[in-house]
Amino acid sequence: DADVTQTPRNRITKTGKRIMLECSQTKGHDRMYWYRQDPGLGLQLIYYSFDVKDINKGEISDGYSVSRQAQAKFSLSLESAIPNQTALYFCATSDRTGNEQFFGPGTRLTVL
Amino acid sequence: KNQVEQSPQSLIILEGKNCTLQCNYTVSPFSNLRWYKQDTGRGPVSLTIMTFSENTKSNGRYTATLDADTKQSSLHITASQLSDSASYICVVSEFTDKLIFGTGTRLQVFP
């Protein structure tokens, strides 16, 4: 079984809809991250969490929110989706050293 | 602004040939430099991680080099295989643990 899983893998939605992307990990890591990837751009950090009670904004947090329900679960929400949020979204985890991040398989989100 | 630039943007080589991908960065100071491989439609997978004091690190047919003085890194792939077709991403970590991602080099290996 994969160590970092994301659901759904693909999602098409309409402008204005609320969307939740979920991430689960079995690596036992404290740190979890959400990134988005756009064609021709490097991955950009949306939010990160160093433990269950810790939530931090990344470089592009506007329009997004997150919830760390447990050590193993970190969800990303788009309260009111807009077309420029169409992208590939990745969840990642790392241990407390942060030396290496392990990425999930990604969620391809299309907002029409 | 801290940046990571990679070249070339894309590269096509024949199976069995060697190739070298370049990464230049302006992040300073930095904690470590990483190379990731990202297959199409998949998440990035770590190939190597080097601290500022390391000059070279290998992982099978992949060898990464780092020159902290010139702020350059390279990833050399030896005897390329079809499965090496992927994007290769250079990532530099600031001391704050913030990661700065390059835009990647897309490598295609043809038989």
Image: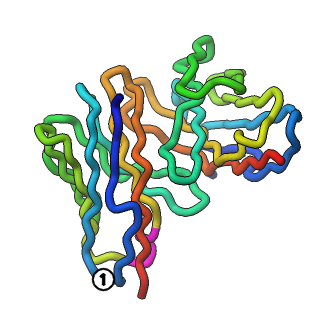
What residue does disc 1 label?
B16
Task: Residue at 35%, 37% (x, y): give it.
Answer: B3
* Figure check: B46 above or below A24: below
Task: Residue at 76%, 52% (x, y): give it.
Answer: A10
**In front here: A22 or A61?**
A61
Picture quadrant of residue B52: top left
**In front here: B9 or B111?**
B9
- Tell me residue A60's x, y (percent): 58, 28
Q: Is residue A59 left or right of residue A64?
A: left
- Tell me residue A55's x, y (percent): 60, 16
Tag 1 subunit: B
Task: Residue at 27%, 80% (x, y): give it.
Answer: B17
Say what amino acid the circle numbered 1 marks: Gly
Residue B45 seen: yes
- Tell me residue A6's x, y (percent): 69, 44
- Tell me residue B93's x, y (percent): 34, 32
**Is the C terminus of chain B in the top left, top right, bottom left or bottom right quadrant?**
bottom left
Residue B84 is covered by the magenta coloring: yes
Task: Residue at 67%, 28% (x, y): give it.
Answer: A74
**In front here: B15 or A79?**
A79
**In front here: A34 or B12?**
B12
What's drawn in magenta, residue-wise?
B81-85
Residue B35 is covered by the magenta coloring: no
